[in-house]
Image: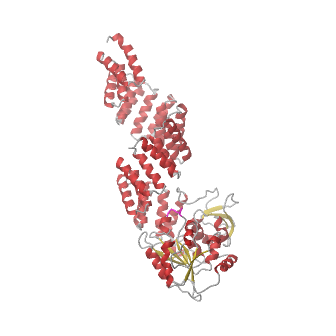
Amino acid sequence: MSSSAIPSELDVAIEHHRAGRFAEAEAIYQKILAENSNHVDCLQLLGALAGQTGRIDLAVDLIRRAIALNPQVASYHSNLGRLLCDQGRFDEAIVVCRQALGLNPNLADAHNNLANAFYGKGQLDEAIAAYRKALRIRPDHLDALKNLGVVLGAKGDRDRGIEVYRQLLRFQPDDAEAHNDLGNLLAQKGRLDEAIASYRRAIELAPDLASAYSNLGQALCDQGKAEDALAACRRAIHLKPDFAEAHNVLGLALTAGKRFDEAIAEFGRTLQLKPGFIYAHNNLGAALYQAGKIDEAILEYRRALELDPDDPQILTNLGLGLWARGRQDEAIAAYRRAIRFKSDFSEAHYNLSVSLLLKGEFEDGWREYEYRLHGKELTSRPRICSQPLWNGEELHGRTILLDAEQGYGDVIQFIRYVPHIVSRGGRVILMGYAEQVRLLEGVPGIEQILTREPLPAFDVYCPLASLPQVFATRLDSIPAEVPYLKADPSLAKLWGKKLGPRTDQLRVGLVWAGRPTHKRDRERSISLSQLAPLATAGGVTFYSLQMGEAASQANHPPPGMELLDLTADLRDFADTAGLISHLDLVVSVDTAVVHLAGAMGKPVWVLLSFVPDWRWLLDRDDSPWYPTMRLFRQKSPGEWNDVVRRVAHAIGRYPRSPDLPPGLHD
């Protein structure tokens, strides 16, 4: 080839190169270099092609040769910096990118490549500054925009990251990867509807983009749409069978759908594809925990912590497993370690409070319990008010709003503090539940009960379950005077007629199940059939107090059990109180009914799981909250037979004579 023919040949090669016909372009570049080994443009172009086709070492060598021949071309240095980043040689990349900028400070590519090197070294602030310089020179520099969005997300500045991705998409609206990345930032901000829309747009643009389906599955799972999440994850896996992250999300969706065995198997497949995948270990632990395989869950959390001993979420999950095994001191240590690494981690603080309160360590426990108001899904409906939070100061006639932010039982337990608020000069408004309005109307000091907004004027507010903290409640200072709730006399009279004249039969109310939506319902609820041994006590008429889905079991009581079901006439808790007022004893699993009976001063026996709710404390058969309460605890996890046998024995010895004081313990 003559030297005069080289320019035209080079133009042909460049055309092939731009069109992606790399083999044709490379053949011509090699032909030119065979004629002139020092053809600097051809060297750098062939170097660029080698980089594009994954031959980074060759690319670096070719670009260095071009620079040696002509060190004054800024773009050569910039391209070398990009290649060195690809090799992970970030310090060298920084040097050559700065050389490029020394030759041409306005070379946007050099700023972008310098930023990539900083990002590779973990110097996020320097990377952000360099990307912004690139964009000041070229606002439409798509790589710089995309890279800046990535780094802002990595730095936790998701709002600015979202802005950058939206700017990128104005220049390049059909960039499926950008829509996918934008969705990730939106999901991290909890803006799930927007995230899902971004993922769906990415899928419209690139129907084979497996990561978008996987991310969509995660967002749908976070929204509680387990079935939709399953479909998205399975599509991702169909497109990319070895996609470990998609298998992991599929496991999460199966867990959300309570298909625990399938979830456990899916996390196992994830770990086969990606050994050491820390989040798969953690998620496997969570699935095992929810399946009741607590010891296996603990082992899995420990495996995850071998990979990252300082992960706050995994430490918190480990604590939860230890808590479920009754190992409270170890659980507390795990929670405290999680908090050391993430001081504002609400879930760890809340779980810590549960263990502390369970042990009776109220001073620290109440303080940590306040984190229930800040964590995701820790309470049923925390209220945000512009009025100040009440801290126990004298109220001098001011109005206080009490927010029943938790469940029915919590309302009954903590409403006992109302007289103490009144003694500090407070006028009390309660934001509560419709099912409890008639019950609580008779509480002295409550001036108004609301069940929906708008709220009336008030001066301060307090979540109802924060009152023990406000009053610095200790085990020996719990306000436990009962009864503090009573049945309405007219309702009591009505229910007396429904039950009919007294006989020598012992009247015992029964509740065997709580609401299935409760996160620990599997541990606390049983079936009516499991109470069959109670029928052997003799001389007992049982009355169903069971509401909800499990109430239908009363239609088929265990053999020999005389069980009357009047629950069709129970409209609310006031009716339940009216019925309880005519019973001798209430026997129940841990539900709101035990709080109601206890608050009424009625003898009440509670069947408790191995690790009960914090309010029942440890290793005692009485409750400082309710003087007429007796606790029957599991001696091992899940073992109800022994509990029921002990209750049956105690009922058999319970005094039948109406002349004896109620609530005697045998």
Along the horizontal axis of the image, is 517 left or right of 280? right
Q: How many marks?
A: 0
- Residue 446 is inside the magenta segment: no
- The residue nearer to you, when weighing 474 against 60, is 60
Left or right: 40, with 522 as reference point: left
Residue 519 is covered by the magenta coloring: yes
Q: Is residue 562 above or below residue 175?
A: below
Taking depth in this image into account, of 303 and 549 the one nearest to the observer is: 549
Q: Is residue 53 left or right of residue 646?
A: left
Report the magenta stretch's main SS: loop
**Nearest the eye: 241 or 198:** 241
Q: Kindly identify the residue that appears in the image at 68 percent across and 77 percent down.
A: 494
> Which residue is painted at 33% across and 30% down in the image?
55
In the rendering, at what x and y percent does residue 404 appear?
61, 64
The stretch in magenta equals: 516-520
Question: Residue 216: where, in percent of width, then height?
Answer: 50, 45
Q: Quadrant of residue 661?
A: bottom right
73 or 19, nearer to the observer: 19
Type of colouring: secondary structure
> Relative to residue 99, is residue 656 depicted above or below?
below
Quadrant of the image occupied by residue 556: bottom right
Image coordinates for residue 451, horizontal then vertical, percent? 66, 62
**Is there any visible trace of residue 665 in the rendered image?**
no
Identify the residue at horizontal 43%, vertical 52% (top origin): 251
Residue 289 visible in this rendered orientation of the protein: yes
In the depicted structure, whether residue 121 falls above or below residue 7 = below
Quarter placement of the N terminus: top left
- x, y percent for residue 361: 47, 69
